[in-house]
Image (cartoon, rainbow, N blue to C red):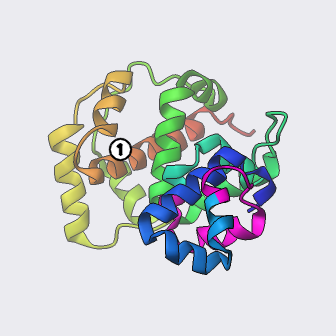
Amino acid sequence: MDFSKVSDEDRFRVLEYVVSKVGREKVQEALKISRITMWRLLSKQVRVDDNKLRILLSLITQREFEDLVSAKNRLRALGILRDDGSVDYGLALEVLALAKNDEYLKNAVLRFVVQEFREDLKKMLGMSFSGTVLRWDDGFERFLMERKKKRKVRDPETLKYYKNLFKKYLEGKELSEHLIDYVVNHPNKRLRNVFRHYIQFYIIRERFRLRPSVG
């Protein structure tokens, strides 16, 4: 973290929070400062420098820090957002790359893309989902068992559970914004997985159909 990007206001907010959490005496002891200096810090007469900020952050959790400092300022501190408002695309893409190995982050990214960039996504894919009706068939079942890139569904009971979910909530439904919103907000997270797998299957199938024949 680049401490120089943390504003004075956020530094003072961290100081106040740590004092309320562990007590003034413990903070004074951790910072190795006098009572007068502690008073001057709390009265904003002295700036919380980088060294003091580093010590204060060691006394709280990452979640507490995130609650105290605004998202934009955290991005600045991490170097992703520059002072002029531009983005370090290399770092931003590295964060997105983490989604490959983090199921929660991957689902969050997918939900955001679907909600915010639905039309752009369809244009990039070069296909229309209009009129697409979801059907569980042998092709989708084989996809889950054999062609899915990660975590192929080998367990018959898991496959049966997925099929029951699909039949109950998705079978015969037309792919639409309403259905996407319904799945995204459904309390059963497994339904999102089944739905996402079906979209992957559909895209692969349509690309194969649209591929020009050779000869």
Q: Residue at x 36, y 31 (%)?
A: 180
Residue 148 seen in render: no
- Where residue 29 sits in the image (x, y, percent)? 59, 80
How crowded pointer 1 is (Cα within 10 Å; few <14, some 14-19, many 20+) is rated as many
Quarter of the figure with residue 46? bottom right
- Of 47 and 118, which appears nearest the observer? 47
- 176 lies above or below 187: above
Check the image and report above or below for 27 versus 77. Answer: below
Q: Is residue 203 above or below residue 92?
A: above
Q: Is residue 149 left or right of residue 74?
A: left
Is 215 in the magenta?
Answer: no
Give the total number of marks visible in the rendering: 1
The residue tagged with tag 1: helix, strand or loop?
A: helix
- Residue 8 in the image: state x and y as whole percent: 71, 48
Q: Quadrant of the C terminus?
A: top right
Report if residue 54 lies within the magenta region.
yes
Q: Quadrant of residue 54?
A: bottom right
Camera-side residue: 16 or 87? 16
Question: Could you say where residue 74 lies in the image, as x and y percent from the top left?
Answer: 65, 50
- Near-viewer residue (20 or 7): 20
Q: Is residue 146 left or right of residue 138?
A: right
Horizontally, is 66 left or right of 85 in the view? Answer: left
- The residue at the far front in this view is 36
Q: Circle 1 sits on which residue? A: 195
User: Residue 148, how many percent across, how many down?
Assistant: 47, 60
Q: The disc labelled 1 sits on which kind of residue?
A: Phe
The range drawn in magenta is: 40-65
| Residue at 44 percent of width and 57 percent of height | 104
Q: Is residue 155 visible?
A: yes
109 on left or right of 194: right
Residue at position x 28%, y 54% in the image: 190
Q: Quadrant of the N terminus?
A: bottom right
